[in-house]
Amino acid sequence: MVLMYFTFKKMKKLLTISILFLAIAFSCKKEKVEETTYKPTPYSIRVPAHFPIPEIPAVNPMTVEGVTLGKKFYYDPILSSNGLTCSSCHIANKSYSTPLFINSTGDYISVPPHVNLAWNPDYNWNGSEPKLDHLCIADFGPDFFDTDMDKLVLDLKAHADYPDMIYKAFGVTDVAQLTHDELKQTIVYSISQFMRSMVSADSKFDKYFDHQVGFTASEQSGYMIFMTERGDCFHCHGNPLFTSNDFRNNGLDCTPQGQNMGRYLVTGNANDIGKFSVPTLRNVELTAPYMHDGRYSTLEEVVEYYNSGVCMTSPNIDPIMTKPAKEYGLNLWPWEKEDLVNFLKTLTDTTFINNPDYRNQ
């Protein structure tokens, strides 16, 4: 009986040790699984055949998880203290733009559309932000979201989806361990990935370019005006992006003041007075009003401006505007102006604005 007692006691001790060993082994295995779970899936931007290859910064590579997270943030008022979202100022039916924004100094600003941003070298009308991955950080400020960062941290931690989505996209296990600046940057990285994924290249013009459809007589006439010296539009707005992605003074003001000083406000270089980033004309039918301050309400007004309203004495005016025979404008006939507008409308991409990958669906 004594022998059996000691044998049983020894077996009990061995069993306890075995259970402890298994518990430790399971714990290590669990930690190892968690460490290897973070494996985001590479995302490839759909690059249309006639588009250049976009440069994706190594600091923020595109992933499926990052794009998915960015889309969720784009439409979620969780980022703001006032109920605003990115989509409040970037409306799908307006090619992800909005009519006008009035800033804290009372300036009227035409909000650029979120379209083909992966190909932009700089952002904002005067190029004040050179990196898309930094662009949206300003939105956390009082002019836009007026974000309460402490509350945002608590809201994200308590959310049913965000902790897992943020981990899968960026490997962050606890947003509370990030500084507020680090959290803002992480969120902006995801939104930037989503915006880079927004590609527009399925307009009537694109189908025409691929020989899938034909133009009406008016659209064809407008195309010829646009792409020749008659209208001289193509120098700044050539296919495929319909922007030269540089800064030019198109003669809007004879004596620019305030925000109308344009690029000069960023560089301080007098040669940049009156210059603005050339906007894309893709979906231009949807993005009224026009110019950096929304001074023109319709495409017809824009065409008439180039036809007869350019201030030829504006400082640093682009040489294209003052070429021989252009000193008094384009002198287009009424029917030519109508044709040019009709061509511009062929750049409207309804597939883009209805794409469920971009809309809040």
Image (cartoon, helix red, strand yellow):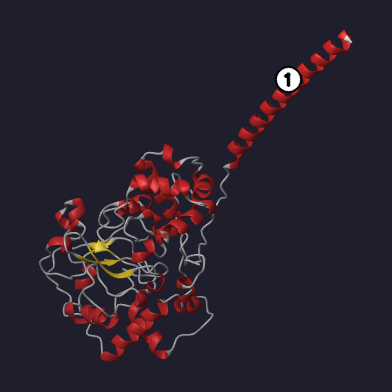
Q: Is residue 27 above or below residue 276?
A: above
Residue furthest to the left? 255
Residue furthest to the top? 2
Residue 72: where, in percent of width, then height? 47, 58
Residue 217: where, in percent of width, then height? 41, 90
Query: In which quadrant is the N terminus drawn?
Result: top right
Relative to 323, 243 lies left or right: right
Residue 12: where, in percent of width, then height? 78, 19
Circle 1 sits on which residue? Answer: 17
**Residue pictured at 34% horizontal, 46% vertical:** 149
Q: Secondary structure at mark 1?
A: helix
Residue 259: where, in percent of width, then height? 17, 61
Q: How many marks?
A: 1
Camera-nearest residue between 116 and 5: 5
**Residue pictured at 19% horizontal, 58% vertical:** 272
Camera-nearest residue between 296 and 207: 296
Residue furthest to the front? 1
Q: Is residue 88 visible?
A: yes
Find residue 6 and report its image quarter. Answer: top right
Q: Residues within 10 Å of mark 1 (few under 14, many from 20)?
A: few
Camera-nearest residue between 61 and 326: 61
Find residue 313 and report its image quarter. Answer: bottom left
Relative to 230, 254 lies left or right: left
Q: Is residue 37 above or below residue 300?
A: above
**Residue pictured at 60% horizontal, 42% vertical:** 37
**Residue pictured at 17% horizontal, 75% vertical:** 310
Q: Hey, what amino acid is under mark 1?
A: Ile
Find residue 235 and report its image quarter. Answer: bottom left
Residue furthest to the right? 1
